[in-house]
Image: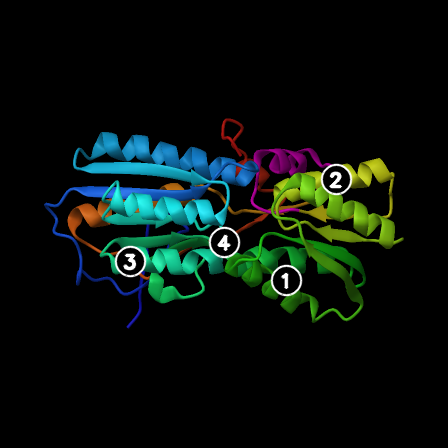
Amino acid sequence: MKQVIRAIGAGVLALGILGTSGAARADDKVTLGVAIPTADHGFTGGIVWWANKAKADLEKAHPDLKVIVKTAANAPEQANQLQDLVTVNKINALVIFPYESATLTQPVEQVKKKGVYVTVVDRGLTNTSAQDAYVAGDNTAFGKIPAEYLAKALDGKGNVVALRGIPTTLDNERWTAFTGVMKNYPDIKILDAKYANWNRDDAFKVMQDYLTRFKHIDAVWAADDDMAVGVLKAIDQAKRNDIKIVFGGAGSKGMVKNVMDGAPMIKADVSYSPKFIYDAIKLTAEARLKGDKLPATTIIPSVLITKENAQQFYFPDSPF
């Protein structure tokens, strides 16, 4: 039986079965490891900032809690960090934002087999039995919302190019949702879709290639605000004026400001805040301190950001 609850605040849906079987005793101390990617672009910069804020806030509030934050520049480094967290730091709970889905699934599974409670964030594993809980943004909506917006803005016809992130389950979810909508518009042609690793420099190179190969492009789904920055730079350097819309994603303060200011190609964005790492750490820590478990899945909705509601999503003091 599924139970639906509210978690953290309005707009966060948790879906799953609540229970305490296999849970730590409420009087146990909790040593919680946090494994996340390094700040190699704006979004992961936000992830690192929010993770360290969670550590500071939660350790201050809970004397029986220790939070250890590790950042990794690649998947093998993150796998090695998991071993250290278990053998050296003796963690009994883990919150992990996997660098990659497939590569990290077995290492995370080994951690869980050691009796560590595992919460996976955002980039899901290829085997869900390797986790106890999953916290993420709404990746289906993240792909669906831009597709619906672009289809309407293009009046159902035109040429679109797309940039994907890193090969992960969440990228697959977004791409499946995006193309699922576009199948309803046979006069919209997706000319190509390449991985640009959620990185503005890689996106710049991919977009340069698109601009060289395709003489007419109506819109770009950049699928990430950092990648959108690289796309815009490439368009500007090529002095192309055929492209009407560049749609990013995640609601970075720079892109939201562009939406607010009515920038020529940035008409809208979709929310996907890195704050969910804070929420995941808080949920996991407080549940384990009580000896409880989280729902199996907690989904944080994505919302279309337009000029009309952009002010609600603009946080100038945030790192992202």
Find disc 2 in the rendering and name its residue. Answer: 232
Q: Position of residue 136 (x, y in %)?
A: 43, 53
**Residue 37 x %, y %:** 47, 42
Badge 2 marks a residue whose secondary structure is helix
Q: Given the image, on which type of amino acid does mark 4 rest? A: Glu
Camera-near label (4 vs 2) is 4
Q: Mark 2: give few (<14), some (14-19) or many (20+) Cα within 10 Å.
A: many
The answer to whether mark 4 and mark 2 are in CB contact below 8 A is no
Q: Which sits earlier in the primary sequence, circle 1 or circle 4?
A: 4
Q: Amino acid at mark 3?
A: Lys
Say left or right for 141 vs 228: left
Distance from Cα at disc 2 to Cα at disc 3? 43 Å
Residue where numbered disc 3 is placed: 112
Kind of residue at disc 1: Phe
Q: Earlier in the sequence, mark 3 or mark 4?
A: 4
Count of numbered circles on the image: 4
Residue that mark 4 sits on: 100
**Nearest to N terminus: mark 1 or mark 2:** 1
Q: Which residue is mark 1?
A: 178
Q: Which residues are magenta?
A: 248-266
250 in the magenta segment: yes
Q: Nearer the viewer, mark 1 or mark 4?
A: 4
Q: CA distance from mark 3 to mark 1?
A: 33 Å
Label 4 vs 2, first from the N-terminus: 4
Q: Which picture quadrant has residue 216?
A: bottom right
**Mark 1–mark 2 distance (CA, rounded to whole Å):** 21 Å
Q: Residue at x 66, y 43 (%)?
A: 227
Confirm whether residue 8 shows in the render: no
2 or 3: tag closer to the N-terminus: 3
Residue 205: image x %, image y %? 75, 44
